[in-house]
Amino acid sequence: MNDPQDGSTELDRTVTRRAVYPVFQPVISLRSGRVAGYEALARGPAGSELRNPAELFAQAQRAGRLTELDWVARAAACRAALAAGLPWDIPLFVNVEPATMGTDCPPGLAETIETANRELQVVMEITERSLSDDPAALLTSVARVRGRSNRIALDDVGVNPASLSLLALLSPEIIKLDRHIVQGRPTHETAQVVNAVLAESERTGAIILAEGIETERHLAAAISMGATLGQGWLLGRPGPLPGQFERPDTDLPYSTAPDSGARTPFEVARRQRRATRATKRQLIPLSNHLESMSEHAPEATVLLGAFQDASYFTEHTRHRYQAIADKGALTAAFGRGISAQPAPGIRGGSLSADDPLTAEWSVIVLGSYFSGGLFARQLPTSARCREADREFDVIISYDRSLVAEAARTLLSRLAPIS
């Protein structure tokens, strides 16, 4: 309600006065039953409709104050954890809006945040839904966070199965299965999510955390899905931090996505593989084969194509990419003169004339199970050749980490979604 005396809304007063406080839900080791960490959950003023976090953040989103509220909630969680003497070896999970990760901390909160980064083991928890919204901005923000030694937890995994193929680009240390996966009946969609998460965990060592464990049946289901950590009312309800802490018997992994410093997909591949020589005529069927792997995959995939120039992104290719984008997780095309949306559902990355990527032809397919990439760099002498005889140095790889690193060099060229 509006206050007739100052004209501000309850939300404005809550954010301006920073009247947000945290409660903490324990994260439990499913093997030992011991506390493995705490997740901070924001609450608004008691007795207000804003006490409900969903309503609090929804109103902030509508009012354009989501970023400020997110910083206020994060600082409140850090302040309470520091005051309670939470030791460094017990992780503190803090929910963060992806849009906030790349913004400056508001005045008066920075000291608390920086102290927490030094003295606490902070795990930045972001939602799966953010993966496909703006992957370029998210990956940039995650790299900045990891530079401060923060870990990443991906929340709500399973809400949007199409995002599973983007896991390799983010490389989270903790993957949190959404409660509907844990509590629901086994289905084909559930099996798809669980198998994709298990595959990512096996490849990277990421820990699986199951949410929504409220009954013994939920607990058994979580364990069967490979979860080693869990949260839920059966294991512990949100409340204040305890007066004493016991060292956990579970250490969280710390991973960094490979970064060779290369600026283009071919540079990534060349540092690990030897190139061969091929003409454009020889490369076209290889490129089409990779694109067909994305088109006919049983899951949503990432498809990225670098075409040197928009003239090579032909009408036929545009239609094929658009069909893939209709069921894909992320489809993007790069080249000189390519628009921000060259076709419905396709993201465009326009290249400057001096971008080294303008000399390259790349096709990258990344899914939960399949990954493959064609990385080609045109020879300078090809400028005098007929179109079909243009020559390239070529590398083809199905190494997942190489393909994912190459994909990140392309995604960094996508303009943020306004």
Image (cartoon, rainbow, N blue to C red):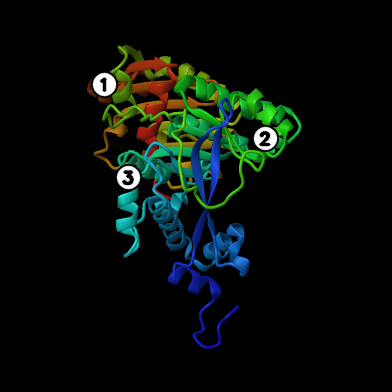
Indicate which label's residue lies in the foreground, 2 or 1. 2
Q: Residue at x 44, y 53 (%)?
A: 99
Q: What element carries label 3?
A: helix
* Coordinates of residue 130 in the picture (x, y in percent): 51, 45
Quadrant, the C terminus: bottom left
Question: Which of the pair 113/198 is nearer the observer?
Answer: 113
Q: What residue type is labelled 1?
A: Leu
Q: Which amino acid does label 2 sit on?
A: Ile
Question: Which of the pair 153/376 is nearer the observer?
Answer: 153
Q: Is mark 1 on a helix, strand or loop?
A: loop
Q: Mark 1 points at which residue?
A: 379
Q: Residue at x 58, y 67 (%)?
A: 46
Q: Which amino acid does label 3 sit on?
A: Glu
Q: Residues within 10 Å of mark 1 (few under 14, many from 20)?
A: some
Q: Mark 2 points at which residue?
A: 181
Which circle's residue, 2 or 1, is located before the other in the chain? 2
